[in-house]
Image (cartoon, helix red, strand yellow):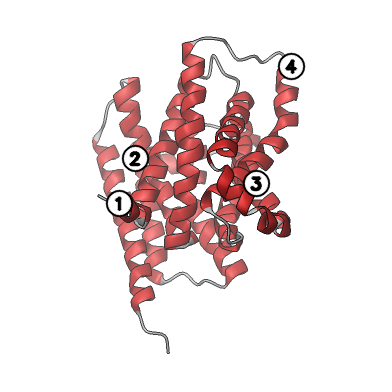
Amino acid sequence: MPASRLWNSAYFLLITTVLFWSGNFIVGRAAGGTVPPIALAFWRWAGGTLILLVLARRHWRADLPVIRRHLPILLLLSLLGIAGFNTLVYIGLRETSAVNALLMQSAIPMVTLLFSFLLLGQRASLAQMAGVAISLAGIAAIATRGRPQDLLAFALNPGDAWIVAAVAVWGLYTTLLARRPAIHPLSLLTVTFLMGTLMLLPLYLYEHAQGARIEAGLPSALAIAYVILLPGIVANFFYNRGVELMGAGPASLFIHLMPVFGTLLAVAFLGERVHLFHLAGIGLIATGILLATAARKRAAARPSS
């Protein structure tokens, strides 16, 4: 398939994005004993910045006048999507369970639809809302291991507030991508990575001062290299383009694929097993995404009055 065709395929871009982001959770878990969490986040963006400053220099240099004129929105996107989201998740996961975090992050598509309506005036159709609901049912099936009654035991604790904040931050970031300036996609990545890295620097220095150190060795190096290249540069490049092609609300629905890919990667690399409730959840999530994205295509094809 030609590269230009892939670049114009929202499905390919967003599915690949979520696959790399899911791998980030597997790598983050595996590297937990060798790379502190803020250090991993900082070097993810710092490494990506160094690479992009060189590889994308022709684009960001040409776009510098536009970048200067639109610094406020670029600073906001950097704060939300680069510095903010992952840091909030890392903090929240210290005090909440994985099930709680997974269920709350699955609300990102609904939060994005809400922000899209409030800020951009984009109304969600009944079919899109139904797609979100069906995907949420799939998430619940996986998170509760096929026991819906476990939702009754869903307990809140202080860490949940951080996860809720992360959900809101990512939904707002996705929505505000519609307001990004007309610059090359690589220029957008370069400037937001750079700004996000600078925002994370004080947190990284504080973590370092508290005695958290990266353990030298091949596992740490491979973990950092992975998060820089795939979840960092490639995934964000693809996600921004996917939102451009599909719109914030439908694109955010692909985040529901994270527990699907996470399960498959855990089977492949962590030796976990697939159960019937995993397959049921995957089926529901796929159905919801297809329903919501099909509704958007029908709305786009409908002639305006």
What residue did someone put label 1 on?
A: 286
Residue 125 seen from this side: yes
Task: Please say if the residues under marks 4 and 2 sit with CB atoms less than 8 Å apart.
Answer: no
Classify residue 69 as left or right of residue 287: right
Residue occupying the point 46% across, 63% down:
247
Q: State which mark lies toward you, 4 or 1.
A: 4
Q: Nearer the viewer, mark 3 or mark 2?
A: 3
- The Cα–Cα distance between marks 1 and 3, rounded to whole angstroms, is 30 Å
Of discs 1 and 3, which sits in the foreground? 3
* Quadrant of the rendered image containing residue 161: top right
Q: Earlier in the sequence, mark 1 or mark 3?
A: 3
Q: Amino acid at mark 3?
A: Ser
Q: Quickly name the residue at label 3.
A: 78
- Residue indicated by mark 4: 210
Q: Are marks 1 and 2 in contact (CB under 8 Å)?
A: yes
Q: Residues within 10 Å of mark 2 (few under 14, many from 20)?
A: many
Which comes sooner in the sequence, label 1 or label 2?
2
Kindly check if marks 4 and 3 are in contact, taking CB atoms under 8 A apart as contact: no
Q: Residue at x 67, y 15 (%)?
A: 212
Q: Amino acid at mark 2?
A: Val
Label 4 or label 2, whichever lies nearer to me, is 4
Residue drawn at x 42%, y 90% as measured from the top left: 305
Which residue is under mark 2? 260
Question: Sequence order check: which comes first, mark 4 or mark 2?
Answer: 4
**Inter-mark Cα distance, 4 to 2:** 36 Å
Farthest bottom residue in view: 305
Residue 131 spot, x, y in % from top left: 37, 60
